[in-house]
Image (cartoon, rainbow, N blue to C red):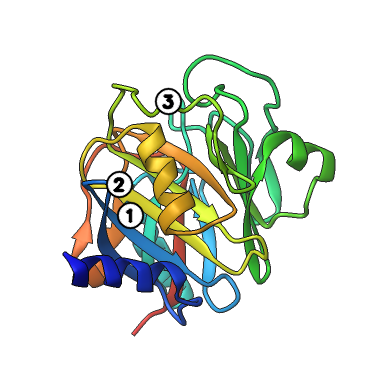
C-alpha cells in the first residue's frame, strides 16, 4: 500500500511527460486510468467528421483517416456530450472553424449544470475554461469542445457536488494546469460520483481547472496499455496525433 501511494504521488507531482503517458491509479478506493499530455510537444486535435462530412465515430476510423497524413492516433477519448445524431450538444471548433455556437445558459442534464466549460486547444497549450470566462475572452482556439459540468474551478470543486451523492457512473474528463502545459485525461474503471471524480483532479492530479466529458458511454484509446474500448459511435473525440512508424 505504501509503495502504491508513493507511486501515485510521484505521478501527481511529476513534470510534463515527453509523450503521452498513461497509467492506472487508485484514489479513495476507486480505480482510474490517467493519461497526461504535454501540449507543447504533442499534437492534440478534436475529431468529428471526415473530409467528406461523414461521422468518424470510432477510434479506428480516426486512426485510418490519419494514415493519409502519414500519422497515427497515439491516444484518444470521447470529448463532450452529443445528440442522437452525434452532433455536439455545445460549442465545437475544429481546425479553427466554429461548427456549433457557445451555449452560455443553464439547461437540463449534466451539460446545463452550471458552471460548465470549454476545453480549448491552442498552439503549445491546452486549457479548460469556464464558459462565461470563455465567452468574455473568446480565445482563438484551433479546437474547442464545450461540456459540463466543470469538475474543478480555479482549484475548487464544483459547488453543487455532494460528498454523499448516490449517483454513480463510469465517468471521463480532462484537467489542465494554469499555464496550459499539462492536459490530464482521466476515465474511471468503476462507477464514481461527481465529488469523487472531481477530487481526483483536484487532490491527486493537481490541476487548476477540470471538465467533465461524459458518463456511462465513456471510452478510452490507449495503445500502450493495449486498450481500445469498443461501443456505439461517438460524437466529438479528442486525440493525440503522432507520426506513423
Q: Earlier in the sequence, mark 1 or mark 3?
A: 1
Residue highlighted by disc 2: 219
Q: Residues within 10 Å of mark 3 (few under 14, many from 20)?
A: some
Give SS at disc 3. Answer: loop
Residue at 50% across / 77% down in the picture? 15
In the rendered structure, find residue 59 and report the number of the disc placed on it. 1
How many dots with numbers?
3
Q: Is any part of residue 50 visible from this angle?
A: no
Q: Where is 109 relative to 161, above or below?
A: above
How far apart are the two marked residues, 1 and 3, measured between alpha carbons?
A: 34 Å
Q: Residues within 10 Å of mark 2 (few under 14, many from 20)?
A: many
Give percent across and percent down for residue 156.
Answer: 57, 42
Q: Find the residue positioned furthest to the front.
A: 2
Give percent across and percent down for residue 12.
Answer: 41, 66
Q: Residues within 10 Å of mark 1 (few under 14, many from 20)?
A: many
Give percent across and percent down for residue 103.
Answer: 67, 27
Labels 1 and 2 touching (C-beta < 8 A): yes
Q: Earlier in the sequence, mark 1 or mark 2?
A: 1
Q: On the rendered image, what quadrant is the N terminus found in?
A: bottom left
**Which of 113/58 is in front?**
113
Residue at 69% across / 20% down in the picture? 105
Residue at 50% across / 32% down in the picture? 87
**Which of 39/25 is in front?**
25
Q: On the rendered image, what quadrant is the C terminus found in?
A: bottom left
How far apart are the two marked residues, 2 and 3, measured between alpha carbons?
A: 25 Å
Amino acid at each position: 500500500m505504501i509503495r502504491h501511494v508513493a507511486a501515485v504521488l510521484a505521478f501527481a507531482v511529476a513534470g510534463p511527460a515527453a509523450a503521452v503517458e498513461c497509467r492506472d491509479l487508485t484514489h479513495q478506493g476507486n480505480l482510474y486510468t490517467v493519461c497526461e499530455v504535454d501540449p507543447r510537444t504533442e499534437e492534440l486535435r478534436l475529431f468529428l467528421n471526415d473530409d467528406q462530412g461523414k461521422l468518424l465515430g470510432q477510434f479506428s476510423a480516426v486512426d485510418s483517416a490519419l494514415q493519409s497524413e502519414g500519422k497515427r492516433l497515439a491516444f484518444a477519448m470521447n470529448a463532450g456530450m452529443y445528440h442522437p445524431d452525434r452532433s455536439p450538444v455545445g460549442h465545437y471548433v475544429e481546425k479553427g472553424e466554429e461548427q456549433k455556437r457557445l451555449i452560455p445558459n443553464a439547461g437540463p442534464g449534466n451539460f446545463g449544470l452550471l458552471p460548465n466549460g470549454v476545453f480549448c486547444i491552442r498552439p503549445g497549450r491546452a486549457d479548460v475554461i469556464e464558459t462565461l470566462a470563455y465567452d468574455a475572452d473568446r480565445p482563438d482556439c484551433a479546437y474547442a469542445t464545450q461540456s459540463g459540468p466543470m469538475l474543478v474551478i480555479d482549484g475548487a470543486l464544483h459547488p453543487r457536488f455532494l460528498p454523499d451523492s448516490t449517483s454513480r457512473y463510469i465517468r471521463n474528463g480532462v484537467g489542465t494546469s494554469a499555464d496550459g502545459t499539462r492536459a490530464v485525461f482521466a476515465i474511471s474503471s468503476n462507477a464514481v460520483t461527481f465529488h469523487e471524480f472531481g477530487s481526483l483532479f483536484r487532490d491527486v492530479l493537481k490541476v487548476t481547472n477540470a471538465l467533465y466529458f461524459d458518463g456511462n458511454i465513456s471510452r478510452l484509446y490507449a495503445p500502450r496499455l493495449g486498450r481500445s474500448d469498443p461501443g456505439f459511435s461517438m460524437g466529438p473525440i479528442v486525440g493525440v496525433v503522432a507520426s506513423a512508424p
